[in-house]
Amino acid sequence: MSNKVPQIRFNGYSDAWEDRKLSDIADRFDNLRVPITASDRKPGDTPYYGANGIQDYVEGFTHNGEFILVAEDGANDLKNYPVQYVNGKVWVNNHAHVLQGKKTITDNKFLMNAIKNFKIEPFLVGGGRAKLNADVMMKLNILLPTFVEQEKIGSLFSLLDKTIALHQRKLDLLKEEKKGYLQKMFPKNGAKVPELRFAGFADDWEERKLGDTETHFTDGNYGESYPSAKDMSDKANGIPFLRGSDFSNGYLDSSNANYIKPEKHAELTSGHIKQDDIVLVVRVL
């Protein structure tokens, strides 16, 4: 976004977007929120929302209609701040702000994505439990196109969200299927054959110590060899220096990896990973 005009937009739109305060384009309905302790909730069909999404399903509702929920405090990710679009009957507790775009001025689906794209972290206060105060939130400046263009943008991202949710469900099912195969295609404790195996294989599995296999072990880098601040580099010029936190659910996630200078990498005598290597995390921080 430069000069209040996005890089990509629908055909037929060329006007600059207008800078508006959130209080001018949306109303706040925090006064209707009601927190309920888990022991006092009556099971039902209404989603019960907190800062990070649905926490439960209860009887009754606090809000009915189109709304945007923005975490007030207790957000689990300050960089990808929790912002959600809801439509219908919902119950919202006191950890999420409740907004609704002003009619004919703001499309709710567009506004949800506009706030989601906003860097909220600098506006948070508090230490261990960062909070987005209502007064601060309502003073945020939001770039706004015409209402018709908002509707088009909101509909596009709504379609993308539905597609992502569909693929996520498929991914979750596939993960469960993999989990089932892992349990059945490896022998259980005390057994020598798996419950499920490929046709043509009937021999018992042989139990071996990992150290007896032709496996080469190498450790990571500790002590004096561990890279310091002066050894760090940027992604474009550095080499990834992986930590335990860069691995999750059996996969490498290098999105938050540190990078070290090539000359520091050349100094390290261990921990060099090659293709097809297996990495075992020693400890999780």
Image (cartoon, rainbow, N blue to C red):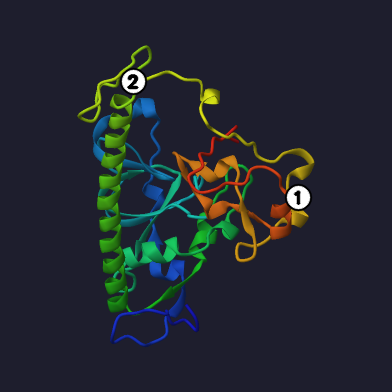
From the viewer's perspective, is residue 86 above or below residue 37? below
**Labels 1, 2: front one:** 2
**Viewport quadrant of the C terminus:** top right
Residue 102 at least partly seen: yes
Q: Which residue is mark 2?
A: 187
Q: Position of residue 48 (x, y in %)?
A: 33, 40
Distance from disc 1 to disc 2, alpha carbons, whole Å, reads 45 Å
Under circle 1, the secondary element is loop
Q: Amino acid at mark 2?
A: Pro
Q: Label 2: how many residues lie within 10 Å, few (<14), some (14-19) or many (20+)?
A: some
Residue ID at (64%, 65%): 237
- Asked if marks 1 and 2 touch (Cβ < 8 Å), the reply is no
Q: Position of residue 199 (x, y in %)?
A: 20, 29
Residue ID at (68%, 60%): 233
Under circle 2, the secondary element is loop
From the viewer's perspective, is residue 178 above or below residue 122? above
Q: Is residue 267 left or right of residue 8?
A: right
The tag on residue 152 is none
Query: In the orientation shown, which residue stands out farthest toward the top?
Result: 190
Q: Amino acid at mark 1?
A: Ser
First along the sequence among labels 1 and 2: 2
Q: Quadrant of residue 203?
A: top left
Camera-nearest residue between 71 and 101: 71
Residue 261 at least partly seen: no
Q: Which residue is mark 1?
A: 228
Total labels drawn: 2
Query: In the orientation shown, which residue stands out farthest toward the right?
Result: 224
Q: Quadrant of residue 18?
A: bottom left
Q: Position of residue 70 (x, y in %)?
A: 43, 54
